[in-house]
Amino acid sequence: MAAHRRSAHRKPKQRPLFGPAARTAATLALAGAATAGSVTGAGAAPAEPAPTADQVKAKVDRLYHDAEVATEKYNGAKEKADAATRAVDALTDEAARRTDRLNTARHALGSLATAQYRSGTLDPALQLALSSDPDAYLQRASYLDRAGDRQSGLLRNIKRQVSRIAQVKARADEETERLAARRTELREHRAAIRTKLADARKLLATLTADERADVERAADARHGGGPVHADRSTARSGPAPATGSRAGQAIAFARGAIGKPYVWGATGPNTFDCSGLTQAAWKAAGVSLPRTTYTQINAGQRIPRSQLAPGDLVFFYSGISHVGLYIGGGEMIHAPRPGAPVRIAPIDQMPFAGATRVA
């Protein structure tokens, strides 16, 4: 009976398959593998086709424009960061000066206290009663009263200085926080610019040399580029402003910058971005302009396109992201974009957004 139970629980041995059974199993396995492979292949995403030259043109153009928008935001953040830096430095200097004055007042108060201690602390009435020369004592007492007034004045001065130093340090802390925020903005805008320009370079690298040249020419046309005029006093520039006028000086500076490279964030003397060029040109004429396109447009009197005169600032795109210096005859001098140097170009190559007369 026990032997029978053991045999009943013993697992039967697996017999290898031979003949038709083996062939049937192999066929089913292969069919299953083929089915799994076909399912896997069906689920895989097809490779994206390479962009055409026209698509690259459109993407590069958009990246250049986005980079210029980010550049102007970077310029604005840098201007605010520079102002915050100056404010922190000024407040730090003020706190140091006030601390020096506080230390001087404390030293004077300490000297006065030491002198009083050495003169004794007897009650004034008793000192008068014991004095062999009451008249001399009364004279000294008047000096002590004045010394007491001086001590009170020193104490009041110290209290004011301590309060003022605390206020200055609180303002310095606030400006330091603002500066940290501006620096964060700078890093973000700088990263955005570099990313967009790197993406544009990657796209251009997918094209042939001839296709890249076509893209660059198209970008020039859309961004007010075109070939640099060899003659910087081109006859097509219209009537020049009066010699010695501020507008004339600004235009003369801009003409001298023709051919210099575009570099984002640059204000000269050897490289410029668009608002950096107009700011530097008018600075040469003795006029201080703000740093960015969207602040320069409010730096003077707005004028319609029909009333443009040489020296006016002309702005483009709905976000006021580009600016040039009008020279007459429908042309301007501007810094177009990375890879395109300062040049003369028609103002009708970009969407016109407005104009401002600085002086």
Image (tube, rainbow, N blue to C red):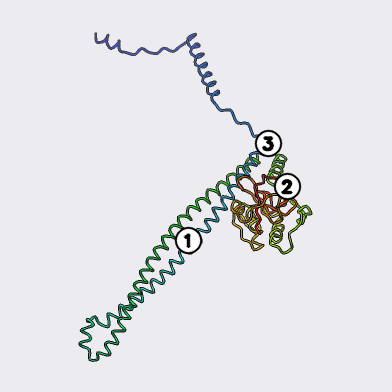
- Given residues 230 and 127, the one toward you in this image is 127
Q: Local crowd at mark 1 within 10 Å, few (<14), some, or many (≥20)?
A: many
* Mark-to-mark CA distance, 2 and 1: 45 Å
**Quadrant into which the C terminus falls:** bottom right
Residue 239 higher or lower than 213, as above or below? below
Report helix, strand or loop for mark 1. helix
- The image quarter in which residue 252 lies: bottom right
Specify whether 265 is left or right of 131: right
User: Residue at 43% across / 66% down in the picture?
Assistant: 95
Which image quadrant is residue 170 in?
Answer: bottom left
Asked if residue 99 is positioned above or below residue 294 in the image, the reply reads below
**Which residue is disc 2 drawn over?**
226
> Which mark sits nearer the N-terminus, 1 or 3?
3
Where is residue 319 shown, x and y percent of the image?
60, 46
Amino acid under label 3? Asp
Instruction: Name which residue type carries label 2.
Output: Gly
Q: Residues within 10 Å of mark 2 (few under 14, many from 20)?
A: many
Q: Earlier in the sequence, mark 2 or mark 1?
A: 1
Q: Residue 150's quadrant in the figure?
A: bottom left
Image position of 225 (left or right of 96): right
Q: Residue at x 41, y 71 (%)?
A: 100
**168 lies above or below 204:** below
What residue is pinned by disc 1? 88
The residue identified by callout 3 is 54
Residue 317 placement (x, y as % from top left): 63, 45
- Residue at (34, 72) in percent of width and height: 155
Mark before the other along the chain sequence, 3 or 2: 3
